[in-house]
Image (cartoon, rainbow, N blue to C red):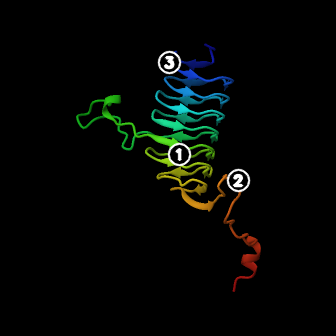
Amino acid sequence: MNTWQAISDDVKLGKDIKLSKFINLYGCSVGDNTKIGAFVEIQKNATVGRNCKISSHTFICEGVTIEDDVFIGHSVTFINDRFPRATSATGQLQTEADWTVEPTIVKRGASIGSGSTILCDVTIGENAIVGAGSVVTKDVPPNTIVAGNPARVTRTLDAEGRQVLNPKPEAQNSKSQYLNHK
């Protein structure tokens, strides 16, 4: 084990993995030809598919499944507990036995922009794109672009997820809007 990497013995790593320094992997599996950036944590019972890129400072918690060919931007956080609390009703510190992990799935070819938060029990559809800084609170349909807090569909993509089918009309120059206002 590299002194700059914490990788437990129960981690399953595929072939041709590229691992940066300062990572924490335990009880997870990572598919072939995947790149994991610095300061990434992937918890137990999480799965990352083949040909994925997980950018730095990302947290992938227990119960998350990331399929093949997925891009995860910098500082993305996945949440797996709908109602997190430090203590129980009796005042005792909670343990793993006190919550239920709710799974999240990121389907093949999806991209999640930097700084996004993905709440539990959602599916991000194939080829979907989550805009930077979004908060995903419900399922994202395949071949769509979502953005905002909460994330909402802003565009539709073709079947391969490569071309925008309903482009946004070009915004007017903000200066001309003020000059032409009556």
Q: Look at mark 2 in the image and give the residue it sits on.
A: 162
Q: Residues within 10 Å of mark 3 (few under 14, many from 20)?
A: few
User: What separation in Å lies between label 1 and label 3 (alpha carbons)?
Assistant: 27 Å
Q: Which mark is residue 117?
A: 1
Give the CA separation, mark 1 to mark 2. Answer: 23 Å
Q: Nearer the viewer, residue 17 or 4?
A: 17
* Residue found 50% across the figure and 18% down from its top: 10
Query: x, y percentage for residue 18?
Result: 68, 25
Tell me if 68 is positioned left or right of 9 in this view: right
Quick one: label 1 or label 2, which is nearer the N terminus? 1
Residue 28 placement (x, y as % from top left):
51, 26
Q: Helix, strand, or loop for circle 2?
A: loop
Give the mark nearer the N terminus: 1 vs 3: 3
Circle 1: residue type: Thr
Amino acid identity at mark 2 = Arg
Decide: marks 1, 2 in contact (CB < 8 A)? Answer: no
**What residue sits 64% from the left and 39% below the top?**
69
Disc 2 versus disc 3: nearer the observer: 2
Residue 95, can we see it?
A: no
Could you tell me how far apart the alpha carbons at marks 2 and 3 are, in whole angstroms? 37 Å
Q: Is residue 115 visible?
A: yes
The image quadrant that residue 2 belongs to is top right
Which residue of the protein is positioned furthest toward the front in this rendering?
A: 159
Q: Mark 3 sits on what residue?
A: 10
> Exactly how many numbered labels are in the figure?
3
Quarter of the view holding residue 106: top right
